[in-house]
Image (spheres, helix red, strand yellow):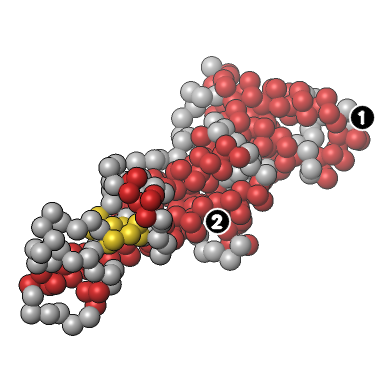
Amino acid sequence: MRKLASAAYEELLEPERCPECRSKLVDAGGEVACPFCGVVLGPSRPSQDANTAGSRPEMLGSFIGPASNNGGRAQVAGCAIGVTKRWAEAIGRNQSFLRCSGLIETVACRFFLPKTVVQNAVQTARRLLPSRGECRATVPAISAYSLLYACRSAGICHVGFRDVLKAYSEAGHKVSKSQLLRIGRGSSLPLPAAKPEEMTKRAVATLQSNPAVLDRIRKANLDQSGYFATLLEGARATAAASTDLGGFSPRTLAAASVYLAGRRLGPRTITQKEAAESLGIAEYTVREFCNRFRSQEAM
C-alpha cells in the first residue's frame, strides 16, 4: 500500500475523500486509509485531548499483535479487523472486474469491434458483477454476456451466441449458452431482441463467401455485387413484411427472408439448407416459415 505526502494528506482532510477513487476515508487503527482501494494516506490526527487513552496513533496492522490490558487496544483492533475485511472484499471485486474487462477487450479484438462497443461491454460487466453469486455465473460468463449485450445494443449482427461461445472456448474459457441465459433471466439487463432486418445482412454476407452459391451465380451469368445488393434489399423488405408471423425466432425470419428473396430474383442460386446454415439454424424451420408465408400471401 502506498503512502502519500503529508502535505497532500493535509489538503485532503477537509473533503475526507480518497484522492484516487473518491471513497470516504476511515480511521484504520491510527492511520487514515481508503477501505475501497487500500490507499494509506498517513497517520490519523490525534484527538483534542492528547492524554486521552487510545489517542496515540498506531501503525496499521498493529492489532495483529497480542492485546494489552487496555480495552482501547481491543476496540481499535476490532475496528481495524472490520476495515481489513472490507479491503479484502474490495480487492476481490477489483480483481474480478479487471479480469472481466481484460477478457472483454481480448475477445473484442477478434471481432474488430468499435471502441464504443467495448466500453459499453465493460460498463455492463461492472453492473453485473455484484450479482454474479445470485446468477451462479463465472467471471468469463459475465464478460461474454456483457460483450453480447453491447453488440446487441449497438445493432451489430455478426456477433451472436455461437460466435461468442466459440471465441471464449478457443481462448481457454468454458462458457455455455445456459449460463448466458441464466444471467439474462437473473439480472436487470436482459439481452435486447435481435432485429431480423439486421440479421439478413449477416446471412447475405455469409452467402457471399459460399463457393456453391458463387458457382451458381457465375453459371447464371449474373453480376455478383449487383445480385447480393438486390438480394439484401429484397430480404429486408420480406422480413419487414413478415413480422405478423408469430412463433419464429429472428434468425429463422431472416434466413427464410433471404431464401424467399433469392427465389424472386429468378435463377435458383440459394437453397433452403444454405440459407439456414448462414445463420446456424435448422433447415426445417426455414421450410416451415416459407410454407406459412406463402399461405398468408395466398389469402
The residue that appears at 55% across and 56% down in the rendered structure is: 103
Q: Amino acid at mark 2?
A: Leu
| Position of the N terminus by quadrant | bottom left
Q: Which residue is mark 1?
A: 221
The residue that appears at 78% across and 38% down in the rendered structure is: 208
The residue that appears at 83% across and 25% down in the rendered structure is: 226
Circle 1/circle 2 CB separation < 8 Å: no
In the image, residue 8 above or below residue 275: below
Q: Helix, strand, or loop for circle 2?
A: helix
In the image, residue 269 above or below residue 74: above
Residue furthest out toward the bottom: 66
Residue 270, given in percent of the width and then of the height, sits at 75, 36
User: Tag 2 or tag 1, which sits nearer the N-term?
Assistant: 2
Left or right: 98 in relation to 90: right
Quadrant housing residue 213: top right
Left or right: 102 in relation to 41: right
Left or right: 71 in relation to 275: left
Q: Amino acid at mark 1?
A: Asn
Could you tell me if residue 21 is visible in this image? no
Quadrant housing residue 77: bottom left
Residue 149, given in percent of the width and then of the height, sits at 49, 42
Left or right: 77 in relation to 114: left
Q: Which residue is mark 2?
A: 103
Residue 218, given in percent of the width and then of the height, sits at 90, 35
